[in-house]
């Protein structure tokens, strides 16, 4: 029985290790985001303590089969208890008021022919690459190769000055990359926008392109930003101005040709061709009649009101044109998949991908990766946003 056989120290140690390595430990529950998931180790321990006749420390590492037992979860959420019960042979029944919960747990537990799934996924990626792959390429600064893969596009929010009407980049700081996972610190020049690598973070020196003084702190702080052109104090956000505008200011890419002799990551300021790709994606999206991208309004709520304060009125405004184009084409291709089970699995993958394919993701300057929209509670509207490549997400 749980009351006398549940070994708290044993399970607590296992659960702690499971959570510490959850980026490498990817059980089936990782197929889609769900909030506040508890460790599978915990539920496995509860089941074994209740139904096994062996000590928990022994039973945990043995094969167990509780066929004929039925476990019900009336508030199943992401389904961790049901998944663990199913893995030890129990029949399971789950309920939840949230339809997304039903869909996720169903997709986690239904049989999937992996060979058919892999073939369909590979075909989807090949077609996507033909359709939109060129939008996620750039020129390597080191070897000049024209079609290296982009990892991240970095955008800064832009506000029009209330006095001189010139655009202001709302940089909270000019440090693009710290010297933790890259050999040196990478700074954005406040004058010319070029990138300079430095040894010191506090005294970065001067831009190697225009000799302007590099600085750590940006002009945007605590909802205020001084216009560099006229010195006027501007407030943000401004809901009346509509959804915020963004300017592409940096790219992180990968060059397989240069990588063997290159230390660290690859960064660049976008060139003319990169900006042309942005314009091309915008034109293509404007000409498209979306079938799967919804135009729903963002309802009022404790968390969604933060989006309203930033001028967001519809969910699709949280994405840029390149993202909307890629997501719409992906949905169209998935909908054509004849195998219903495989189609649903790919649709679930696309749904989870939305966590990274939006303009609310931020860039971690130390870990050098995108932070998904749910990395903190609510909707974190930052001043610098990270657009992940659809082709390498």
Image: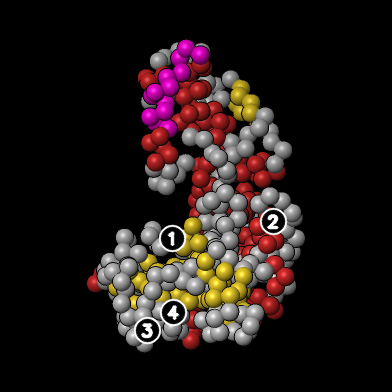
Q: Mark 1 to mark 2: distance in Å? A: 25 Å
Residue topped by disc 2: 305
Of the residues tagged 4 and 1, which is closer to the observer?
4
Alpha-carbon span between mark 4 and mark 1: 20 Å
Q: Badge 1: how crowded within 10 Å, few (<14), some, or many (20+)?
A: some
- Identified at 50% across, 54% down, the residue is 118
Marks 2 and 3, the one that precedes in the sequence: 3
Rendering quarter of residue 331: bottom right
- Residue 60, visible in the rendered structure: no
Pair 2/3: label in front: 3
Relative placement, left or right, of 64 versus 336 is left
Which residue is at the front of the view, 75 or 215?
A: 215
Quote the CA–CA distance across marks 2 and 4: 32 Å
Q: Quadrant of residue 53?
A: top left
Q: Nearer the viewer, residue 150 or 231?
A: 231
344 magenta-colored: no
The circle drawn on residue 190 is: 4
> Which residue was labeled with disc 3?
212
The reply to whether dot 3 and dot 4 touch (C-beta < 8 Å) is yes
In three-dimensional space, the C-alpha distance between marks 3 and 1, rounded to whole angstroms, equals 25 Å
Please report contact status of discs 2 and 3: CB closer than 8 Å, yes or no.
no
Going from N to C along the chain, the mark reached first, 2 or 4, is 4
Numbered range of the magenta stretch? 3-15
Percent position of residue 36, x then y: 55, 40
Residue shown at the point (50%, 62%) measured from the top left: 362
Dot 4: what SS?
loop
Instruction: Please give the residue where the numbered disc 1 appears in the rendered image.
Output: 364
| Cα distance in 3D space between marks 3 and 4 | 8 Å
- Number of numbered markers: 4
Q: Is residue 181 left or right of residue 25?
A: left
């Amino acid at each position: 029985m749980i009351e006398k056989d549940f070994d708290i120290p044993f399970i607590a140690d296992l659960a702690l290790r499971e959570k510490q390595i959850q980026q490498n430990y990817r059980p089936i529950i990782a197929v889609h985001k769900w909030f506040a998931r508890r460790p599978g180790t915990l539920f496995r321990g509860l089941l074994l303590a209740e139904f096994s006749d062996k000590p928990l420390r022994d039973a945990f590492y043995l094969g167990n089969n509780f066929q004929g037992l039925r476990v019900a979860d009336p508030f199943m959420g992401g389904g961790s208890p049901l998944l663990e019960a199913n893995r030890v042979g129990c029949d399971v029944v789950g309920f939840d008021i949230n339809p997304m919960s039903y869909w996720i747990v169903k997709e986690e537990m239904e049989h999937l022919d992996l060979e058919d799934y892999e073939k369909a996924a590979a075909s989807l990626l090949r077609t996507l690459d033909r359709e939109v792959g060129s939008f996620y390429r750039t020129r390597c600064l080191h070897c000049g190769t024209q079609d290296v893969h982009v990892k991240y596009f970095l955008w800064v929010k832009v506000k029009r000055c209330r006095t001189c009407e010139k655009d202001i980049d709302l940089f909270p700081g000019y440090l693009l990359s710290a010297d933790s996972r890259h050999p040196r610190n990478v700074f954005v020049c406040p004058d010319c926008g070029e990138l300079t690598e430095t040894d010191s973070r506090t005294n970065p020196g001067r831009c190697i392109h225009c000799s302007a003084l590099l600085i750590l702190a940006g002009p945007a702080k605590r909802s205020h930003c001084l216009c560099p052109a006229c010195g006027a104090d501007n407030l943000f956000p401004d809901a009346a101005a509509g959804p915020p505008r963004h300017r592409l200011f940096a790219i992180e890419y990968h060059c397989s040709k240069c990588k063997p002799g290159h230390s660290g990551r690859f960064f660049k300021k976008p060139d003319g061709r990169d900006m042309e790709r942005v314009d091309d994606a915008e034109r293509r999206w404007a000409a498209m009649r979306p079938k799967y991208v919804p135009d729903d309004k963002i309802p009022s709520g404790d968390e969604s009101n933060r989006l309203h304060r930033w001028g967001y009125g519809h969910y699709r405004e949280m994405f840029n044109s390149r993202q909307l184009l890629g997501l719409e084409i992906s949905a169209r291709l998935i909908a054509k998949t004849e195998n219903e089970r495989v189609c649903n699995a790919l649709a679930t993958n696309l749904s989870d991908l939305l966590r990274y394919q939006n303009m609310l993701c931020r860039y971690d300057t130390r870990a050098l990766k995108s932070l998904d929209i749910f990395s903190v509670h609510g909707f974190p509207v930052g001043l610098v946003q990270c657009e992940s490549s659809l082709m390498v997400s």
